[in-house]
Image: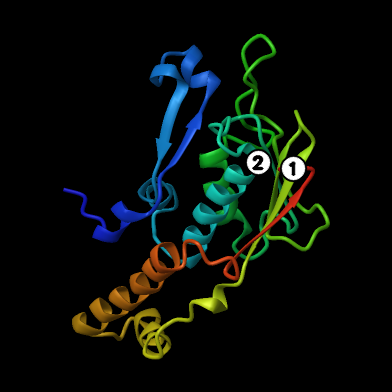
Amino acid sequence: MMRLPEFFKSVPVLTVYDPLAECLGSAEGGVIEYRYADAVRLAGHSCPTVAMSYALTCKGLSELYGESLPERGAVRAVFSDGVEAGVTGVVAGVVGLLCGAAVAGGFGGIAGRFARRGLMQFGVAGEAVFRLQRPDVGAEVSLSARLDRVPAASGLRPLMHLVGAGTASRAERQEFARLWQARVRRMLLDHWDDGELWQVERRGIQG
């Protein structure tokens, strides 16, 4: 049986409206809920990058749609770096899961509707980690994070070297995992509303 860290359940949930899901009867009313655990399942692991991707996407969609449900498949995701640079591909995977945006190989639509193909672009000049855009209203949010606001525990780095070298004991591996997820927990729970950590710049958004 799959067992995930208990704190995953306390991370804020993202609720979206997906017209394709409604059309195909995949979700009643097209309403879909995404949790941090879904991002972890997609990536195969929980780390600061996956946590950042989830949090920034949630916050960006909230800015773009206000009190309305974000529309999955109607948002363009634009990345400053190329898809193979650093952790850009990992971030893009989570963003695509939550927004529905896809590259050239994504869903092409039904009779000209519901297309997600081409809604994700890479290597577009900008300072943010990524930007989310609503072409329908011309609004955009630039999203970045200062992960140094939540530093890793002092004992994490030496344990990482032991784990990476394959020489860590069972107790050391367990302590490494505990400290690793403790940082993720602080980011997503203790600092969820930290505007210094999660940096959101609005453009073309009224109100």
Per the image, the residue denoted by label 2 is 64
Residue furthest to the left: 1
Residue 8 vertical placement versus 62 (above, below): below
Q: Secondary structure at mark 1?
A: loop
Per the image, the residue denoted by label 1 is 205
The residue located at (59%, 43%) in the rendering is 61
Local crowd size for mark 1, using a 10 Å CA cut-off: few (<14), some (14–19), many (≥20): some
Q: Secondary structure at mark 2?
A: helix
- Does residue 5 appear in this view? no
Residue 34 vertical placement versus 68 (above, below): below
Mark 2 and mark 1: Cα distance apart in space: 7 Å
User: Circles 2 and 1: CB distance less than 8 Å?
Assistant: yes
Expressed as whole percent of the image width and height from the top left, the position of residue 18 reads 52, 25
| Dot 2 amino acid type | Leu
Q: For this rendering, which residue is in front, 183 or 136? A: 136
Residue furthest to the top: 111
For marks 2 and 1 on the same chain, the one whose residue lies earlier in the sequence: 2
Expressed as whole percent of the image width and height from the top left, the position of residue 11 reads 37, 54
Local crowd size for mark 2, using a 10 Å CA cut-off: few (<14), some (14–19), many (≥20): many
Q: In this rendering, would 134 be left or right of 195?
A: right
